[in-house]
Structures are given as C-alpha cells and as structure tokens.
Image (cartoon, helix red, strand yellow):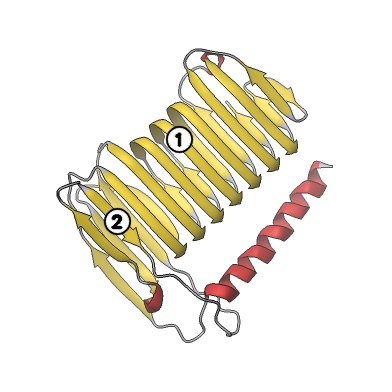
Amino acid sequence: MRHIYSFVLVALTLCAIIYGCYVHGGVNDKKVNADYEFGADVQKISIEAALMDVEIEEGSAPSITYYGAERLKPTVTYDKGSKTLTIKQPDTKIKNTKFDSQSNEMTIVLPKDIKLDDFSLNLACGEVTLQKLDSKKVHINDNLGSFEAQSLVSEDIDIDAALGNVKIYSCDAKSIDIDASLGDVEIDMVKDLENYSISANASLGAVKIGKNTSSSSYVQTGTEGTIMVNCSLGDVEIK
C-alpha cells in the first residue's frame, strides 16, 4: 500500500512542477547574473519568492548571488538600523507561453557561526537547501518544493510544506511544528527524543519515532520541548 502512496506522491509532484513551470516560465526570458551585499551583523532575514531555488551557505563574507530570469530578479534591501535583510521576488502572472524548463537560483552566504533572531521564507515554487542555520525563530512556507537542512538550530521552528519532502539531518530545537500535505518528514534530533513531548500523525503513511513504529500516529510527553508533525500523505520519521 505504501508503494501506491509513493507513486501517487511522485505523480502529483511531477504534475505540479510542470504546471508551476508553465505558469511562471517564459520561453524568451532573458537570463541574468546578479550579486548583492548585506551587513555581517544581520539579525533578521525575510524572503518572499515566487519561483526560485534557495540555498543558504556559510562563508567568510556575507553575499547573495542570483541567476535566472531577468523579470524575476529579486529586490534586495538591507536596513542597517534594524539589521534586517529583505529579499522580494517580483510577483508573476500566468503567461500564455510554451513550457520552459528554466531555473532561477539564489545562494545566500551567511557569516560563519552567525546567530539570527528571525528567519522567514515564503516560497511559491522552488527547492530550499540549508547548509547551516542558527536562528531563534524559523518560519518556512514552501508550497511546491522540498526543504532540506544539514544543520538547523532554533528555539522555534515552524514549517509548512504543501507538496514536497521535509528533511532535517541535524536539528537542535525547543519547539518544532511541521505541517506537510504531500511528502515525507524526516528529522534527526541532536538531543534525546525521550525528553520531548511528541505528537506525530500521518493520515496515509507510517510513523516512526526512535525505535517505535506506528501505523498512523504517536504521542508521548516530555519536558525538554515539543515536536508536532502532521502529514497527510507521506511517512514521518523522527530519531
């Protein structure tokens, strides 16, 4: 039965990606390269994007690079007073064009070992890849695309993924709230799971918490923090 669910997920993902590219893509779009700078003392990052893959990396100096359609080149501003970096991609409209497999990519390089107060990303269509992110608050809203983090440290993590997998390979957090409609959720916690209050549900999928496996739901209590995961179609694994 799980193979059937996986097939349905793959089929829906492919259809959604094709539709997203058809809606946002343009055959004659001019490609551009753009570079931006922002303060090394940044504390807040806000990203609003329509069609773009986003990658967060660590480096010696803060920078942003973009490659993609000129009409979708983001506006980047940095407020020195509030130490806020704002990135906004132009709104798009449905274009009566043929399918185009173009891609728009943005890479943000953060200073090594920086700790943010707030990181917010709202993305209509695109993949999100984090090498390492340390922020008091993290909010991710990705309607179409997978979210993957090698290392995520936060007091409060809130992730909404409509269609795509959510994978966090090293997670150190006090509060985690993940809603995934179509896709698997995998979290590898740094601290012992036994100390967390956990509520995990998979309407059409399996739930595995540590060594415990359940057909659809799992609940436990703890004092270290809270982990809440709701998945409509897909598996949930927390370890």
What is the CA distance from the residue labelled 2 to the residue labelled 1?
20 Å
Kind of element beneath mark 2? strand
User: Could you tell me if residue 52 is visible in this image?
Assistant: no
Asked where in the image residue 117 lies, by quadrant, the reply is: top left
Tell me the quadrant of the picture where the N terminus can be found.
top right
Amino acid beneath label 2: Thr
Residue drawn at 43 percent across, 68 percent down: 104
Number of numbered discs on residues? 2
Asked where in the image residue 94 lies, by quadrant, the reply is: bottom right
Q: In the displayed image of the protein, which residue is found farthest to the right?
A: 1
Considering only vertical position in the picture, is 137 above or below 224? Answer: below
User: Could you tell me if residue 143 is visible in this image?
Assistant: yes
Q: Which label is found at residue 18?
A: none
Kind of element beneath mark 1? strand
Q: Which residue is mark 2?
A: 86
Tell me the quadrant of the picture where the C terminus can be found.
top right
Asked where in the image residue 236 lies, by quadrant, the reply is: top right
Amino acid beneath label 1: Ile
Q: Which residue is mark 1?
A: 157
Whole-percent x, y for residue 95 in the image = 55, 81
Whole-percent x, y for residue 155 in the image = 39, 28
In the drawing, does residue 108 fall left or right of residue 157? left
Circle 1 Cα neighbour tier, 10 Å, few/some/many (<14 / 14–19 / ≥20):
many
